């Protein structure tokens, strides 16, 4: 693959990046062999082909010149030791090319010029520019923060914020933050492993005034992307591409990796919510609503102050598509809690999709963003039980533990094994759509002699295992 991509870069210098980006196998090889992850395909291709890095040994980001010349430079001499060393080496080589007599003549000429122009032999003796040296190059309030060991330690070492993120907040260069971290004696991380989605979630929590630990390794012995001690809540950002599996990765498929971490967190009394990067991008408001509810930031309205009414099919579809992470699903009955004419919370019921457990299933249950109806679930269930005696439901363990269902009277039956779906990093393909009977309808290059997995892997898709479901019964 390396030779193929090298030849492609040489033969298609203007178009190779687009070709590689649209070719799943090539792009996967580039990601697997690049020493870093970037939005720039040319940078990753150069790294994969030549083993180059986008940061110097001191953690400063280099500038990418082009696919031929790669990376060059890592900041000014004032902030990066590499640059100082390179300048020093260059100066030494230049000086070595002159004799001692020539060097002395150059120094004498410099001194004469300084004396004739400014009346002193060296710049350090000039009174007219002393004020420039004393003037801070950054805003005083920013300098105070950068110089504050406690604040910097909390941001960079405890919360594990990246230097880029801190620099963005303070309005300074990335290298300025690194320079002050070095002055404080912090060990510089070579690069930030925080995804853009993780940083986005963290910034949202900052806006809410929620204290959290980013990149916590101490609490459960494995890394928690974001841990909120006050709520005993952790948030895991599962990138579709990096948390899925393909045989070409040469790694053993770990089908329980997400469930194992969820259980490990639960042993410490922590609820772990898994969010994929696609969910945060496409269903941001629903995810934020879910997290606000868990953080007890919602407006609370008592169920006894609401009326129970049937919800028509059009309103049901609209409400679920706007407020439930799985969207609308056809049902036999939908009822809701109304505060005046405002629909606040809704449940839908249909024929059970699990044979032998119960005749009917609670299909969906959700509320409007920013609203918690206290006792709402129990009141809706009480109404449903008047016509549906036996009822089952399930909870996605990636999003919760089903404790609220037990409060409504449901009994925990069992947990399922982790399920899976297919992804290419940008979209999700359900198991149903990936069945062999369905693949022939949409998968380009479908081979009827191959299995579901063989067809999907050949088409560049990856398998993503979830946390499974928790099944509940109300008999």
Image: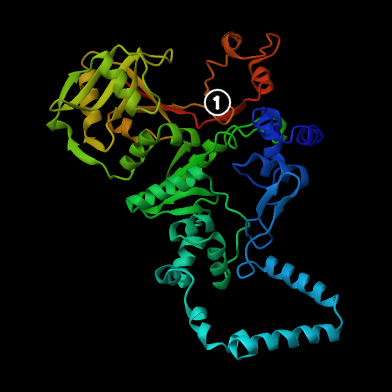
The residue located at (51%, 57%) in the rendering is: 160
- With 129 as the anchor, is 3 left or right in this view? right
> Camera-side residue: 45 or 328?
45
The relative height of residue 422 versus residue 197 in the rendered view (above or below) is: above
> Camera-side residue: 217 or 358?
217
* Element at label 1: strand
Indicate the quadrant containing the N terminus: top left, top right, bottom left or bottom right: top right
The relative height of residue 417 versus residue 166 in the rendered view (above or below) is: above
- With 180 as the anchor, is 474 left or right in this view? left
Q: Position of residue 413 (x, y in %)?
A: 41, 26
Disc 1 packing (10 Å; few <14; some 14–19; many ≥20): some
The relative height of residue 426 versus residue 288 in the rendered view (above or below) is: above
Q: Position of residue 138 (x, y in %)?
A: 46, 69
Residue position marked by numbered label 1 in the rendering:
420
- Res. 390 visible in picture: yes
Residue 471 position by quadrant: top left
> Camera-side residue: 434 or 98?
98
Indicate the quadrant containing the C terminus: top left, top right, bottom left or bottom right: top left
Q: Position of residue 315 (x, y in %)?
A: 26, 18
Q: Position of residue 174 (x, y in %)?
A: 54, 59
């Amino acid at each position: 693959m390396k030779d193929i991509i090298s030849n492609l870069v040489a033969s298609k210098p203007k178009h190779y990046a687009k070709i590689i980006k649209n070719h799943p196998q090539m792009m996967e090889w580039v990601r697997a062999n690049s020493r870093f992850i970037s939005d720039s395909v040319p940078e990753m291709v150069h790294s994969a082909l030549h083993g180059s890095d986008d940061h110097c040994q001191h953690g400063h980001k280099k500038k990418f010149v082009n696919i031929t010349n790669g990376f060059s430079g890592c900041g000014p001499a004032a902030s990066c030791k590499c640059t100082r060393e390179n300048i020093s080496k260059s100066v030494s080589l230049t000086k070595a090319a002159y004799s001692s007599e020539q060097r002395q003549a150059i120094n004498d000429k410099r001194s004469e010029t300084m004396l004739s122009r400014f009346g002193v032999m060296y710049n350090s003796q000039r009174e007219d520019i002393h004020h420039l040296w004393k003037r801070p190059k950054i805003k005083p309030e920013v300098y105070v923060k950068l110089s504050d060991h406690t604040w910097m330690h909390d941001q960079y070492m405890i919360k594990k914020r990246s230097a880029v993120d801190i620099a963005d907040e303070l309005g300074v260069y990335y290298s300025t933050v690194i320079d002050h971290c070095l002055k404080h004696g912090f060990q510089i991380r070579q690069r930030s492993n925080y995804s853009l989605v993780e940083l986005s979630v963290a910034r949202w929590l900052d806006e809410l005034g929620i204290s959290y630990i980013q990149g916590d390794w101490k609490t459960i012995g494995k890394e928690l992307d974001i841990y909120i001690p006050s709520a005993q809540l952790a948030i895991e950002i599962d990138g579709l591409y990096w948390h899925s599996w393909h045989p070409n990765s040469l790694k053993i498929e770990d089908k329980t990796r997400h469930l194992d971490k969820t259980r490990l967190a639960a042993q410490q009394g922590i609820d772990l919510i898994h969010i994929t990067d696609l969910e945060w991008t496409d269903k941001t408001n629903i995810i934020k609503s879910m997290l606000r509810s868990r953080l007890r930031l919602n407006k609370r309205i008592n169920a006894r102050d609401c009326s129970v009414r049937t919800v028509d099919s059009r309103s049901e579809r609209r409400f679920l598509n706007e407020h439930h992470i799985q969207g609308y699903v056809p049902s036999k009955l939908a009822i809701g809690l109304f505060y005046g004419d405002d629909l606040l919370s809704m449940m839908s019921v249909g024929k059970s999709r699990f044979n032998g457990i119960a005749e009917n299933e609670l299909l969906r249950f959700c509320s409007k963003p920013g609203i918690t109806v206290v006792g709402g679930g129990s009141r809706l269930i009480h109404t449903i039980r008047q016509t549906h005696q036996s009822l089952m439901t399930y909870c996605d363990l990636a999003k919760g533990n089903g404790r609220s269902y037990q409060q409504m009277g449901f009994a925990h039956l069992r947990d399922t094994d982790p399920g899976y779906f297919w992804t290419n990093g940008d979209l999700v393909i359900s198991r149903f759509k990936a069945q062999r009977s369905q693949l022939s309808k949409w998968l380009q290059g479908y081979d009827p002699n191959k299995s579901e997995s063989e067809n999907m892997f050949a088409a560049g898709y990856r398998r993503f295992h979830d946390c499974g479901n928790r099944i509940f019964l109300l008999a």
